[in-house]
Image (cartoon, grey):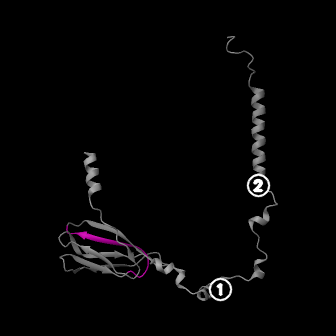
Amino acid sequence: MVLLELTAWLSKRHEQLQTYLVGDPLVVRINPIEHEERVQFAMPPREGESDGASATIVATQSGDGFLEAMVPTPHPGFYAVTRKSHLGAEQSELKAVNVSASEGDIRQLDVTEISDMLRPARQPLETAAGFSTTGDLGGQQSVSDWLLYVAILLLLGEIFVAGRILPPHTQSRRSL
């Protein structure tokens, strides 16, 4: 039975996850026989805010008999979509809205534009003279060296004490 269920699940065509980008409207299709026409959207919080905005949208009729609800996506994050069935049960799902990968492509910028963008972040060489790195501290001993020495001494002391406390084994097993 389990093998049949597994075979059925593997052969079933799985729904592909749709990718949403910032600026594209988030479209939710609703079957009017199963769900109500109102859809609640919870938007992700913006920077500095603790809670995001929420909106209830009434879906409009599409050409194929389904209803469609659309909400704008002004910023990236997880948008929660909650649909209510005619029986009162709620169905929630998260939709991820991402930033377009082309926004991180610096090949589109000219060398002078990149230089102008990085100029405020540069630090004058005079102020960098006082900085030290971990390589500069290489001549000093660290605490870990001393802890290693103490651990070795404790192990040697334990071997010495264990040898004194245990009785000597002078008889062999054959003589017993």
Quadrant of the image occupied by residue 100: bottom left
At numbered mark 1, what does the secondary structure look like: helix, strand or loop?
helix
Instruction: Give neighbour class at mark 1: few <14, some 14-19, many 20+ (Cα, 10 Å).
Output: few
Q: Is residue 45 above or below residue 148?
A: below
Residue that numbered label 1 is attached to: 120
Between 111 and 149, the one nearer to me in the picture: 111
**From mark 1 to mark 2, how far is it between C-alphas?**
39 Å
Q: Residue at x 78, y 41 (%)?
A: 153
Q: Residue at x 79, y 77 (%)?
A: 129
Q: Which mark is residue 70?
A: none
Q: Position of residue 32 (x, y in %)?
A: 19, 73
Farthest residue toward the top? Answer: 175
Residue interval drawn in magenta: 73-86
Q: Quadrant of the N terminus?
A: top left
Q: Position of residue 19 (x, y in %)?
A: 37, 73
Quadrant of the image occupied by residue 162: top right
Is 163 left or right of 19, judged from the image as shown?
Answer: right
Q: Is residue 108 magenta?
A: no
Is 96 left or right of 82, judged from the image as shown?
Answer: right
Tag 1 near tag 2, CB within 8 Å: no
Q: Main secondary structure of the magenta part?
A: strand
Q: Is residue 78 magenta?
A: yes
Q: Residue at x 47, y 79 (%)?
A: 102
Residue that numbered label 2 is attached to: 143
At numbered mark 2, what does the secondary structure look like: helix, strand or loop?
helix
Residue type, mark 2 in image: Val
Q: Position of residue 97 (x, y in %)?
A: 40, 75
Between 14 and 148, the one nearer to me in the picture: 14
